[in-house]
Image: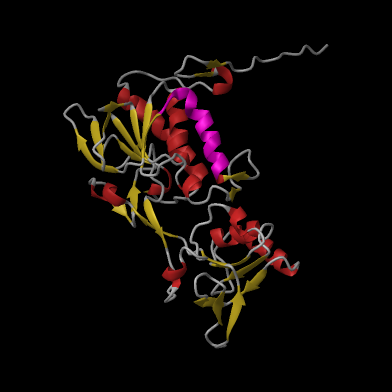
Amino acid sequence: MIKTDILIIGAGPTGLFTVFEAGLLKLKCHLIDALPQPGGQCSEIYPKKPIYDIPAYPEILAGDLTNKLLEQCKQFQPGFTLGERAETIEKQDDGSFIVTTNKGTKHQAPVVAIAGGLGSFEPRKPKIHNITYFEDTGVEYIIKDPEKYKGKKVVIAGGGDSALDWTIFLSNVADEVTLIHRRNEFRGHLDSVEKVQELKDNGKVNLITPAEVIGILGDDKVVGVVVEQAKHIQKEFEIECDHFIPLFGLSPKLGPIANWGLEIEKNAIKVDNTLDYQTNIPGIFAIGDVNTYPGKLKLILCGFHEATLMCQSAYKIINPGKRYIMKYTTVSGIDGFDGSRKEAPKAVVKRID
């Protein structure tokens, strides 16, 4: 039996930052994740994708963000159960919970924080009759290593942030990049839309709208795609390419967590956002992309905020009746579980004559 103060389901950015915030409160954390390494989607799906809305980082690769978070929390010595999925949960007479994985590993904690992101997921695939045949020979739904496309001709389909971001990124890697979207309007951030338009105007990417890829060309590997211009035009043509990357998002599934008696709304866990992001079951919290509440934004930085408030309530559950006085790390410094201490810088006072 693995025992800890806070059991975190999900080792993505929000889960990792929870370790740090809990550590400041002298609370120990253990994380469970079905993936074989920490980082969630940032490490598994798009480690080389740049992220632009992390405070103090004008741009940081998703994989680098994971490494920074691991470095930040390692002083608090978190435990990890990786490559195993949280399967069942049982409440004990003392109020604690026992969570068992699909491989039988048992964990016990008075507080459970579900930080599972979008849960388990699979890519949404376009309805192209022969697409599965080429899934290992030129069709990719996830970009893990952008260098794979160096000197290649790439066709991307989609109208969201991923399609726009990768079009921008690969314009400096691939020999030729074409973005195809079935509408003239895009769902992504305005800055990204304007950047793609600028790249098109400068001849660095091809932009085809409104249009759809309706077929894939090739025998043993992708050599091109068939594109249908807007249906009222009824124009079909072929584009030569080495890779076809449809980026239509992921279809999320909560998996076994959906059977834990939690209140679910549209495949997300409902929480009380007026205080601490607790679920309908006292002692179980949901933070990050896995939760939902009025005004919810699925952003990493919002997950960080939710984790911080959640840890404050977790402290009260674990230490009933004990008062905690918050101290700014700039004043108090940080005490790690390994005995190390990072001192807060001393104030410097200048005398003005």
- Residue 198: x and y in percent read 72, 64
Q: Position of residue 276 (x, y in %)?
A: 38, 37
Extreme right residue here? 353
Where residue 149 sits in the image (x, y, percent)?
Answer: 61, 59
Q: Is residue 301 magenta?
A: no
Which of the image's four quarters has the C terminus? top right
Q: Quadrant of residue 85?
A: top left
Q: Is residue 170 left or right of residue 36?
A: right
Residue appearing at x 80%, y 13% in the figure: 352
Q: Is residue 202 visible?
A: yes
Q: Is residue 31 above or below residue 140?
A: above
Residue 292 seen in the current view? no
Quarter-of-image position of residue 343: top right
Region rendered in magenta? 63-78
Left or right for 199, reference 225: right
The location of residue 68, given as percent across then percent down, is 55, 34
